[in-house]
Amino acid sequence: MRVSIAVLPGDFIGPEVIEATIEVLNVVGEGFGLDFDFQRYPFGGSAIEAYGQPLPDITREAVLGSNAVLMGSAGGPVGDHPWNRLPRELRVETGILQLRKHLGVFSNLRPVKVFSGLEHLSPLKSEVAQGTDLLIIRELTGGIYFGKPSENTPERGVSTMVYQRYEVERIARVAFETAIARGGKVTSVDKANVLDVSQHWRDVIEGVHRTEFPQVGLEHLYVDNAAMQIVRDPKQFDVIVTANLFGDILSDLAAVIPGSLGVLPSASLGGPIGLFEPVHGSAPDIAGKGIANPVGTMLSAAMMLRFGLREGAAADAIEEAVQQALAEDPTQDLGGTRNTSAFTEAVSAALPIPSRS
C-alpha cells in the first residue's frame, strides 16, 4: 500500500529524531507491505528563516494532500531568541496552533505510560509510578487559545475562554469511546466552581454520558485537585478529558512521570488527516550531538500507524521493539549508553517483522 506522509522535521533535534523514526518506519514498511512516500516540508523556526512565517503556503497545501503528518519538535530556546521577538502572529507557537486548526484536529491524545524496568527514572517513588497507564485527551482547537476577544495593550491583557456545545460534545464522545476500549473510566477535569465556561463543559459532558455512554464510569475533578492527584496516585486514572488550557498544563505535568519527556508521543485527531508528534521540545543544547532520544517520535509514528493509517499490527511491532530496546539499554538521558543512532539500530533489529519468520 502506497502511503504519503508529510514530514515536518522542525528545529534543532527535530530533524534528528524524525530521521531516526523514518529509518524504523522503513523497516516496518518492508515487513507489513507499506510503501511510505516521505515528503519533507518546512515548518517552525526553520520555515521562519526561509519563508518569513512558521507555516508557509507550501506546507499548508502539502499536508492536506497526505495520508498523515509526522512532525518533529519545533521552536527555539526560551528567552531572548530572535524567533521569540517576532510579532505573535509570526511566532512558532502561532504556527503550531494554525496547523492544528488547518487540519481540523480537535482531539489530542497523550498517553502516559511507565515502562516496566524504568520505574526508577520517575521523580515519583517507584511503587507509585509503577503500572501508570493513563491517557490525557485534550480539546485542541477551542478554548482560551482561540477565544475572542484577545488583546494585549499597555493598559490591559484580555484572553477569552469559550466553548460551544458541539465542541464539548465531540471531545466527550472521543473520551467515552476511548475508555470503552481501555479501563472503562473517564475523569473530566474543569474549574466549574468558579468558571461559567467550565460549568457549561461539565453540563455537556454529563449530558453526553447520560444519553450515549451510561456504561462508562464518569467522575469530575477540579483542575487543581487533578494536578495533585496525578502526582499522588497516577494509577487511579484511565482516561482524562479536559479543555485546551488545562490539558496543556496537565499533560506536561503527567509527562514527567515516566522520567523523561523524550519517551512520550501524541496524536492529534478529528480531521481527515492526523498530526503525530512527540511532546518534548527542540532541545537546542544537545542538537547535533547525536544523543537525542527518538522514543517519543517513534511511538508517535506507532500512533500514526494505529490511528491515522489503521495499521494496528505494524503499530504493535514498533511499540514492542521500542520497549525491548529500552529494557536492554536505553538512551543516555534515561541512564543508558546508547546514542540516537545506536538506539535506532536496536529498535530496527528488534522489530518482529512477519517477512523475517
Image (cartoon, rainbow, N blue to C red):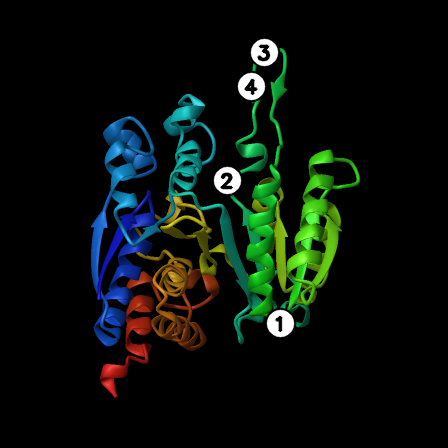
Q: Earlier in the sequence, mark 4 or mark 2?
A: 2
Q: Nearer the viewer, mark 2 or mark 3?
A: 2
The CA distance from mark 1 to mark 4 is: 44 Å
Residue under pointer 1: 130
Question: In the image, 224: left or right of 338?
Answer: right
Amino acid type indicated by mark 2: Thr
Point out the frontmost of discs 4 and 2: 2
Q: Is residue 119 depicted above or below 88 in this figure? A: below
Image-quadrant location for residue 355: bottom left
Relative to 191, 126 lies left or right: left
Question: Mark 4 packing: few (<14 Cα in 10 Å), some, or many (20+)?
Answer: few
Q: Quadrant of residue 182?
A: bottom right
In the image as oriented, which residue stretches furthest toward the right? 193
Residue 265's x, y, as percent? 45, 58
Instruction: Give residue 154's mark.
Output: 3
Pointer 4 residue: 151
Q: In the rendered structure, which disc, 2 or 3, sits on the residue that comes first in sequence?
A: 2
Amino acid type of the residue tagged 4 in the rendering: Glu
CB of mark 1 within 8 Å of CB of mark 2?
no
Can residue 160 be seen? yes
